[in-house]
Every structure is written in C-alpha cells, then in structure tokens.
Amino acid sequence: QQTQQRCYWQEVLRYKPNPENPSKIEYEDIELMAARVGRAQQSERILNRARKYQFYEKPWMTTQKNKKAKIYNRDKRVVEDMKRYVKYVMEVRKSLREGEEMNNVKNGTGTKGK
C-alpha cells in the first residue's frame, strides 16, 4: 500500500478559467478550500503519528541493547589493547634485531651472503 504526503502549500487554492469569459479566472469557494485542506492535514497527521510508533522500543529492549553495547565495548577495548601489545612486541623485536646486526657489523661477524 502506497502512502502519499502533500506539501502544505501545494494546491491550496484551486482555480479554473471562467467558461463564459476565458480571460477571467474563477477561484473555488474559500470555505470548501479550508475544509479540504483541513481533511488533508488531519489524514497526514495520522500517517506521521503512525511512523512514530513503528520504531518504538520497549524499556526492557533498551536495557538489553545497552547491556550488549557494554559487552561489545569491553571486548573491543581488550582487542585494542592486544593490538597495541602485539605492535609493541614487534617493534621491540625489530629494534633488537637491528641492534644485533649493528653489534655483528662492529665485531666483524656480520653475514654478508644472507
């Protein structure tokens, strides 16, 4: 089922050319226009209100969602700490290897053929 919404100022006052004199424009009755616009706005409000209740979240669902988010953030923090630790260990190993290579070059025991 398709739903349509109207812009408030769109088609507010209808008019048509006068059949007797086409150069003159004949406007609709103002009371009819007000009634028509009132009906249209009233029906649109119902549609807008219905949209509010489509996404309603019960309080226990909010609590459950917050608990899951807390667990996720805690696990994410652990993973981030692990990534930092692995990066630190890799940097230390790299610096130790470079230090050993520098010592081997100074001592003359370096490996050139590698």
Image (tube, rainbow, N blue to C red):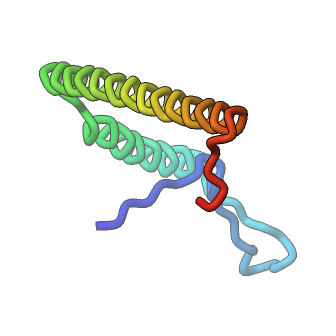
Q: Position of residue 14 (x, y in %)?
A: 64, 61
Compare residues 3 and 97 and report the one nearer the observer. 97
Q: Position of residue 48 (x, y in %)?
A: 39, 41
Left or right relative to 68: residue 73: right
Q: Position of residue 79 (x, y in %)?
A: 34, 30
Compare residues 2 and 89 and report the one nearer the observer. 89
- Residue at 27% from the left image edge and 27% from the top image edge: 75
Which quadrant of the figure has residue 46? Answer: top left
Q: Residue furthest front?
A: 108
Left or right relative to 45: residue 19: right
Q: Is residue 44 above or below residue 28?
A: above
Which quadrant of the figure has residue 109? Answer: top right
Left or right relative to 9: residue 32: left
- Residue at 72% from the left image edge and 80% from the top image edge: 19
- Residue at 49% from the left image edge and 35% from the top image edge: 90
- Residue at 47% from the left image edge and 54% from the top image edge: 5
Compare residues 91 and 17 and report the one nearer the observer. 91
Q: Position of residue 100 (x, y in %)?
A: 58, 33
Compare residues 45 and 60 and report the one nearer the observer. 60
Of the 4 image quadrants, the one containing the N terminus is bottom left
Q: Residue furthest left?
A: 60
> How many numbered discs, if any?
0
Of the 4 image quadrants, the one containing the C terminus is bottom right
